[in-house]
Amino acid sequence: MSKNNLPLLAFIDSSAPSSMSHSHLMLSLSRCPCAAVHLMFVDGANYQDLLHEMTGQKTVPNVFINKKHIGGCDKTMKAHKDGVLQKLLGEGSEVFDYDLIVIGGGSGGLACSKEAAALGKKVMVLDYVVPTPKGTTWGLGGTCVNVGCIPKKLMHQTALLGTAVEDARKFGWEFSDQGESYIQHGRKYEHSMYCFQKLPLMVLILGLRSPNANIESFSDPPSRNGKIPVNDEEQTNVPHIYAIGDILEGKWELTPVAIQAGKLLARRCDYVNVPTTVFTPMEYGSCGYPEEKAVEIYGQENLEIYHSLFWPLEFTVPGRDNNRCYAKIICNKLDNERVIGFHYLGPNAGEVTQGFGAAMKCGITKDQLDNTIGIHPTCAEIFTTMEVTKSSGGDITQSGC
């Protein structure tokens, strides 16, 4: 095929950064016959004079598609992002066996597959299962939930119950401090504590991935941590291949996020206002921006940060520290003090944060929080009575619940 008949023809200078960006785009469109004329290897000055006369453009790269002038790097990239480039190249006319192929039958993969199928698309799901003595047919999906979310919450609840038993003595309950014997199913069990002479090889392994998934093909530069970098549209460096869920670089490793991202792959998922909780003995919940990121984006002078320590009622009887729990909201002064960051350290953080996550999606402001009637005595009501700002340096310690 001669250069006169090539669908995509570009005049570039490999020493120019914009030309290198364009070269990466051309490589990603490798299914399309194309050619690049390197001006540094030909009579570059003469070529550029001719191109300037033809197109009015002095810079490189200078791109033509089907003999139609597109422009330089920025215009070519924009045409690719808007889908114009693909239409000019005739992409989309091919007939495929499936409309969508999903690799990975976890929460996000199945959510995306079901959503596409509900829209009338033909979908194939490929799930990688490591062969085990039980075979390879133990089903699709839920791996993160089964080995992560559920055990995490159960172990967290175990720790809370242990603390509750200790607190119960302050509420009048009596327990024996001596070990007891129990009879269960005809066998005798002693209340005992076990210890290992040496550390076991493995205790619990979460989030394993196949080392042979060849994800390096989608990473430029190559990923060092088994993650895939994507753009704002969740697209990899290969057109028509997208990534969602825990495999994404720099995104939340949360099952609800993966499910929502799967559903909204053709639309957009909000990766900022993601409510999340760390189930430590003192739970921590957050939604929106951390303080450092908010300052970086909006500037310290455009933010008002309200915060307070608080003392849950259930901490009073056992005599726990009355200044262990903390609440903070970050407000954008340029947007009617809209809450852009929510942070909570205290009991039942998951339950509290979930509700505020919905409120932040609706654009809740500090004034709306102040006009909300609090439920007494609860921990969440602290957000309806916040008055002290960090900038004021005022005292936030509490003496009562």
Image: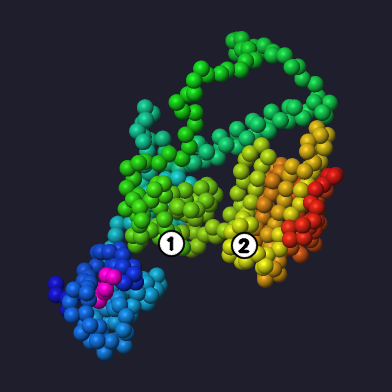
Q: Is residue 260 visible?
A: yes
Place of residue 281 in the rendered image (x, y in percent of width and height, measured from the top left): 66, 37
Q: Which residues are magenta?
A: 8-15
Please identify the quadrant where the C terminus is shown: top right
Question: With 298 as the anchor, is 253 left or right in this view?
Answer: left
Q: Quadrant of residue 315?
A: top right
Q: Is residue 147 magenta?
A: no
Residue 273, image x, y percentages: 60, 58
Q: CA distance from mark 2 to mark 1?
A: 23 Å
Q: Quadrant of the N terminus?
A: bottom left
Say which residue label 1 marks.
Answer: 231
Residue placed farthest to the right in the image? 400
Nearest to the observer: residue 210 or residue 318:
318
Res. 324 image quadrant: top right
- The circle drawn on residue 295 is 2
The residue lying at 27 percent from left, 64 percent from top is 27
For marks 2 and 1, the one nearer the N-term is: 1
What x and y, as percent, mark residue 129?
Answer: 37, 38
Considering depth in this image, is 263 or 277 the residue closer to the camera?
Answer: 277
Q: Is residue 381 visible?
A: no
Q: Is residue 37 left or right of residue 265?
A: left
Identity of the amino acid at label 2?
Val
Q: Secondary structure at mark 1?
A: loop
Disc 1 crowd rating (10 Å Cα; few below 14, some 14-19, many 20+) is few
200 or 178, nearer to the observer: 200
Q: How crowded is the residue under tag 2: few (<14 C-alpha within 10 Å), some, or many (20+)?
A: some
Tag 1: amino acid: Asn
Q: Is residue 10 magenta?
A: yes
